[in-house]
Image (spheres, helix red, strand yellow):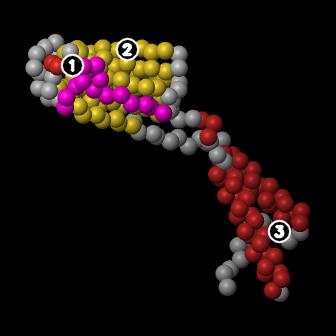
Amino acid sequence: MPIPIRFSKGDTAEARLNSIETTLQHFSRRLVKVAETIVPPVPIFARESILKEDGIAFRGLIPYRGHLGIVAVHIGKFLYTPVIATFKIYDSSGGSAVTMNCTRQINSRDLNHPFNEPVILEVIIEPYDAVEEVLIAILTHPEIRVTNREQHILDAVLQSYELAEELEDERDANV
């Protein structure tokens, strides 16, 4: 038979309530401290060997709030230059575009473009027949929603108290 855990101290009901109140006050001071969660960037990768006439090398939906970080374009083989990569971002209010001249085999840029709702991202290579293969990497940074915070410590204290009460009631019933 397991050893009963006594959550509250004291012999009288008032002493037990005072003990519980003291414990809850102790834990409430800890609730003020905020634990931070680190969310790593979410990478998106795409590869396109043969581009269609519209030049779209990537089209995708980013389903969360956050911001676009570093983007990189790798050109497998230049057939001729110059090559321009255009990053188009569409949301419910319209769209915006950022262009990048691709003069080397690997080109990168930090877009640092925030978005407050899901967005559609397109990467267009112009002229479409100037390259043989395109590799694309995009780092997106999801936003952490503060409103989803929960009070786990208080819940754990209350569960421990309920378990101690049940064990004590069981012990009293067996005596």
The residue singled out by tag 1 in the image is: 128
The residues bearing labels 3 and 1 have C-alpha atoms spaced at a distance of: 80 Å
- Indicate which disc, 2 or 3, sits on the residue closer to the N terminus: 3
* Residue at image point 66% right, 48% down: 151
The residue singled out by tag 2 in the image is: 97
Under circle 1, the secondary element is helix
Question: Is 10 displayed left or right of 126 in the figure?
Answer: right
* Tag in front: 2 or 3: 2
Residue 8 at x, y = what percent?
A: 78, 66
Instruction: Indicate the quadrant where residue 123 lies.
Output: top left
Q: Which residues are magenta?
A: 49-63
Q: Which amino acid does the dot numbered 3 rest on?
A: Gly
Residue 61 included in the magenta stretch of the image = yes
- Indicate which disc, 1 or 2, sits on the residue closer to the N terminus: 2
Res 10 label = 3
Relative vertical location of residue 39 with respect to residue 18 in this rendering, above or below? above
Q: Are marks 3 and 1 in contact (CB under 8 Å)?
A: no
Residue 109 at x, y = what percent?
A: 29, 21
Under circle 2, the secondary element is strand
Q: Within 10 angstroms of label 3, few (less than 14), some, or many (20 or more) residues?
A: few
- Indicate which disc, 3 or 1, sits on the residue closer to the N terminus: 3
* Residue at image point 17% right, 19% down: 129
Across the whole image, how many numbered discs are drawn on residues?
3
Q: Which amino acid does the dot numbered 2 rest on?
A: Ala
Question: Is 48 displayed left or right of 158 in the figure?
Answer: left
Q: Mark yes or no: residue 102 visible.
A: no
Under circle 3, the secondary element is loop
* Tag in front: 1 or 2: 1
